[in-house]
């Protein structure tokens, strides 16, 4: 679907590593080039027409993102460098001041490092307790296990919308309802979820959310932090400098601008923001429901074909997202990836930035296929045929 929009696909590659980053459609590449070719200027800095054009495009992107995730206000959208930056802003900028010693944070063993390490830092700095919601036999978060994990010390639950290895989609709306009934704040890492389905932050009642542009067909180095206005207004800036201050004097008096500007100190990634705008328009034109259905159908086809191979072990057969984790029995995951690369099939191998996941799968490495709407059944058929010949894997990679 829409394969002609992606130049890399003409290079005879099968790109199955969309969970790491996505290919960029022509409209995104064109938007970046247009910025440099036609109206290069800084945002919010100039008093001339070209700069005003950039100001308008930059701020209109904020509104596009607001509409894309159904936030209430443009001012609830902050541009970041990506999900990791956004998650760190949430944890260090808000929760460092909000949490106290012995307060509890609920996460899971299958979270990405950017939703684990910042909490570990607070655990060391102020003595909070990081607790893990138990996963069921399918490595999923259940409402029952979430309820059982709550104590009177629980102050925040921080979860991926979709995990990057297991691929399970969390019941965020239900979790938010229970959390808020218990005065618990909800943080969502939406990096793996937002490229594949419509996320509605008001309907799901999400307090904080972060995601990356490059995983949703936009440029690298740009992302989004969303938070409800009253919570966002309490985040301490990580960067101090140009753009985010209203006034400062030689005797140390500093007055900061209103949000979101005060959280975007320094020269912004303008090309990234404008490229993200093009990506959002592109996704909207295709339709998120259409993308979601196509990718689910493609995943079911892939699982069905993998199930026919008795030497393949699939670890997440029962989830319904674009991610499939598997291994060739008896073969190290990176060796499988190297073998597949001989046939121009690009997959991810390793622990996928989820280094404590071996506590879930009881293995430290998997091969991950993460599908996109530009993948198709013909590519899956090629993968299956190559896997069928993997008995010669050692001859081919050594």
Image: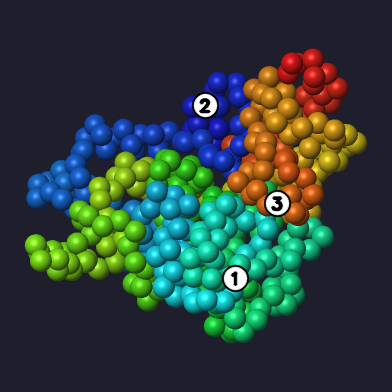
Dividing the picture into quarters, in which one does residue 348 lie?
A: top right
Distance of mark 1 from mark 3, alpha carbons? 19 Å
Query: Percent from the top left, x then y, of residue 16?
Result: 64, 35
Is residue 228 visible to us here?
no
Front label number (3 vs 2): 3
Secondary structure beneath label 1: strand
Q: Please determine whether, in this image, residue 105 is positioned above or below residue 335.
A: below
- Counting from the top left corner in percent of width and height, residue 363 is at 77, 45
- The disc at residue 357 is 3
Residue where numbered disc 2 is placed: 8
**Could you classify mark 1 by the number of other residues whose Cα lies within 10 Å: few (under 14), some (14-19), or many (20 or more)?**
many
> At 34% from the left edge and 59% from the top edge, which residue is drawn?
238
**Label 3, label 2: how far apart the Cα atoms are:** 32 Å
* Residue 235 sits above or below residue 21 on the image: below
User: For residue 389, which numbered disc appears in the image?
Assistant: none
Q: Give the label on residue 129, or none.
A: 1
Residue 264 spot, x, y in % from top left: 30, 56
Residue 320 placement, left or right of 307? left
Q: Are marks 3 and 2 in contact (CB under 8 Å)?
A: no
Element type where label 2 sits in the image: helix
Q: Is mark 3 on a helix, strand or loop?
A: loop
The residue furthest right is 310
């Amino acid at each position: 679907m829409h394969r002609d929009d992606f130049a890399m696909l003409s290079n005879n590659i099968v790109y199955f590593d969309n969970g790491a980053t996505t290919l960029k459609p022509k409209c995104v590449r064109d938007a970046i080039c247009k910025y440099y070719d036609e109206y290069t200027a800084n945002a919010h800095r100039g008093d001339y027409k070209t700069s005003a054009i950039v100001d308008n495009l930059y701020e209109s992107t904020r509104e596009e993102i607001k509409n894309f995730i159904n936030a209430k206000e443009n001012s609830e959208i902050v541009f970041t460098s990506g999900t990791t930056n956004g998650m760190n802003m949430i944890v260090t900028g808000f929760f460092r001041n909000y949490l106290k010693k012995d307060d509890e944070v609920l996460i899971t063993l299958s979270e990405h490092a950017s939703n684990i390490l910042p909490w570990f830092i607070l655990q060391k700095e102020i003595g909070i307790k990081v607790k893990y919601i138990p996963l069921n036999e399918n490595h999923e978060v259940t409402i029952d296990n979430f309820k059982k994990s709550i104590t009177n010390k629980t102050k925040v639950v921080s979860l991926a919308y979709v995990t990057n290895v297991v691929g399970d989609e969390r019941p965020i709306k239900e979790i938010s309802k229970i959390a808020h009934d218990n005065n618990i704040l909800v943080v969502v890492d939406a990096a793996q979820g937002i490229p594949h389905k419509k996320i509605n932050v008001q309907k799901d009642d999400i307090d904080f959310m972060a995601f990356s542009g490059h995983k949703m067909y936009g440029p690298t180095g740009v992302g989004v932090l969303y938070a409800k206005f009253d919570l966002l207004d309490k985040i301490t800036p990580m960067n101090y400098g140009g753009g985010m201050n209203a006034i400062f004097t030689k005797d140390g008096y500093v007055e900061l601008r209103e949000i979101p500007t005060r959280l975007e100190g320094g020269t912004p990634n303008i090309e990234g923001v404008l490229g993200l705008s093009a990506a959002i328009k592109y996704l909207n034109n295709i339709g998120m429901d259409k993308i979601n259905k196509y990718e689910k159908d493609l995943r079911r086809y892939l699982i069905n074909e993998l199930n026919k191979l008795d030497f393949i072990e699939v670890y997440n057969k029962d989830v319904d997202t674009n991610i499939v984790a598997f291994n060739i029995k008896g073969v190290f995951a990176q060796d499988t990836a190297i073998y597949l690369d001989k046939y121009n099939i690009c997959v991810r191998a390793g622990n996928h930035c989820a280094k404590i996941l071996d506590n879930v799968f009881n293995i430290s490495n998997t091969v991950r296929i993460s599908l996109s709407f530009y993948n198709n059944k013909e590519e899956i058929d090629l993968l299956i045929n190559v896997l069928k010949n993997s008995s010669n894997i050692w001859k081919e990679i050594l």
